[in-house]
Amino acid sequence: MKMIRDWLDHAACRDADPELFFTVGYDAQAMQDREEAKAYCRRCRVRAQCLDLADQTDVEDGLWGDTEKDKRRPPTRGDLTEMFYSRTKLLPGGHLEWTGFFTKRRCPVLRAGTKNLSAYRVAFRLCHGREPEGHVTSRCGQRGCVEPSHMQDSVTRAQPAA
Ligand code: SF4
Ligand SMILES: [Zn+2]
């Protein structure tokens, strides 16, 4: 987990718009965005690590290490764990802030290859080892917290407090 955090700190695209790396189509704007993304990759010090991660991830589109590929294996549980924690920041009180991508409605999203996964649902799976049922919410009351042990689904919400 720490290793991936270390190299991501050196990613040239760290503060770039993630959309640049997931362009769709070939119109003028998409081509311009793709070139901008490639420029980040070409000056990136951690391109090799990025490519390694891409090889462990099921990506059909998206630019990783200046490379677009169409066949990669699905992310393993270990990959997702690393990807999840590398996009978080520990807050006082044991809460976890999401530093990754957000939808326009401020839902935290973990982008795993071509898939956009809800960070809340990934967090729930990390703690409980099963798919959540129904809506996943945070039981701690800290807005936007994604700490896995603070997540609850319809089953755990219905259980009496210990
Ligand atoms: S190689 Fe490109 S996509 Fe990968 S971390 Fe560097 S800038 Fe980002
Ligand atoms: Zn919390």
Image: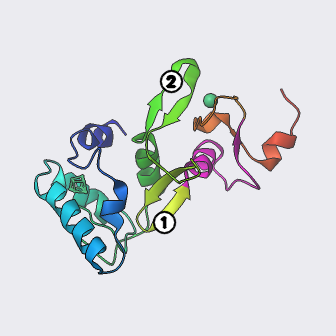
Residue at the spot of label 1: 115
Q: Residue 104's x, y, as percent? A: 54, 53
Q: Determine contact: label 1, label 2, CB under 8 Å.
A: no
Q: Residue at x 72, y 33 (%)?
A: 139
Asked if one can make out residue 155 in the rendered structure from this viewpoint, the answer is yes
Q: Height in image: 70 above or below 62? A: below
Location of ligand 1 given as a quarter of the image: bottom left
Give the left or right position of residue 39, taking residue 83 as reference.
left
Disc 1/disc 2 C-alpha distance (Å): 27 Å
Q: Is residue 101 magenta?
A: no
Q: Residue at x 20, y 61 (%)?
A: 36
Q: Which mark is residue 155?
A: none
Q: Which residues are magenta?
A: 118-138
Q: Is residue 133 magenta?
A: yes
Mark 1 secondary-structure assignment: strand
Amino acid found under the numbered disc labelled 2: Leu
* Quarter of the image that includes the C terminus: top right
Q: Residue 128's x, y, as percent? A: 66, 45
Q: Height in image: 56 above or below 90? A: below
Q: Residues within 10 Å of mark 1 (few under 14, many from 20)?
A: few
Give the left or right position of residue 2, taking residue 134 as reference.
left
Q: Earlier in the sequence, mark 1 or mark 2?
A: 2
Q: Count the labels in the image.
A: 2
Q: Residue at x 34, y 77 (%)?
A: 71
**Residue found at the far bottom of this picture:** 26
Q: Residue at x 66, y 34 (%)?
A: 150
